[in-house]
Amino acid sequence: MDYDAIAKDYDRFNSGFDYKDYLARILPHLELPNAPLALDCGCGTGTLMLELFQRGFDCSGVDASPEMLDTAFEKLSGAGYTPHLMCQTLPEIDLYGAYHAVFSTMDTVNHLLDKRQVKGFFRCIYNFTEPGGYFIFDLKDKVLFSDTTPQIDEEDGSTLILQKSFDGTYACQRLTVFRPGDVGYTRAEEEIWERWYDGGELRAYLQAVGFSSVRTIPYRGRKIIIVRRPL
């Protein structure tokens, strides 16, 4: 469940997510210094990091998928930036220094299937957030999980078949990608599991480790939660 098999296709089939608009909803609520340090947890192919670099952030990224990190490095270095990328799982994240803004977007927290993992992740992030800094993440709403309509998407000659299930707590996405090859097509498969979380419960976890609430923003079937480490 680390996206390695579909890393090369991830951007192709997620081009509809508007990171510029996403950040436009968040950044006005943050008080940040010049050239702030940002950490993207679950950075994937680096699209959010690219937007942050372009806004003057100095960015680092963490992801569990080596293939996704390779794609991120190619994207960011090709745009003239030098990212610091680390291959780690979020519950075991181990970093040097602290950041003014920590992001975990596109329902990355929903990928943590055990509440103990979520609590451990929040404790780690508190330690790696500067006093006065922010932790920003989003959660999928139950309505979005409940839509289990199969999807077939075609982009640049490749085809994605997406099958979904949801039992009220756990959701599974089964992805099959067909890519054109020298002869015929190649096939890649991935099974992605997520868990629905109640936002109020997670805000209690955040408060327990020391974060204070700033704002919750509804956003396209998700809730963006912004918390702050007190000065």
Image (tube, rainbow, N blue to C red):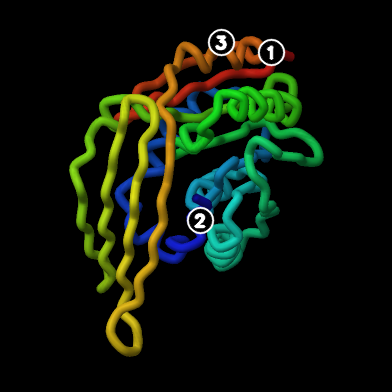
* Three-letter amino acid code at the position of disc 3: Ala
Q: Residue at x 46, y 12 (%)?
A: 200
Disc 1 is placed on an element classified as loop
Residue 97 placement, left or right of 132: right
* Residues at marks 2 and 1 touching, judged by CB atoms closer than 8 Å: no
Q: Residue at x 31, y 29 (%)?
A: 167
Q: Which mark is residue 210?
A: 1
- For disc 3, the marked residue is 204
* Residue type, mark 1 in image: Gly
Can you give x and y, in whole percent of width and height, for residue 125 in the image? 68, 29
Vertical side of 49 occupied by 6: above or below: below
Q: Position of residue 96 (x, y in %)?
A: 81, 41
Tell me the quadrant of the picture where the C terminus can be found: top right
Give how far across and how far down residue 225 sits, in percent. 48, 22
Residue 6, picture quadrant: bottom left
Q: CA distance from mark 2 to mark 1?
A: 31 Å
**Badge 2: how crowded within 10 Å, few (<14), some, or many (20+)?**
many
Q: Earlier along the polypeptide chain: callout 2 or callout 1? A: 2
Res 83 quadrant in image = bottom right
- Which residue is under mark 2? 45
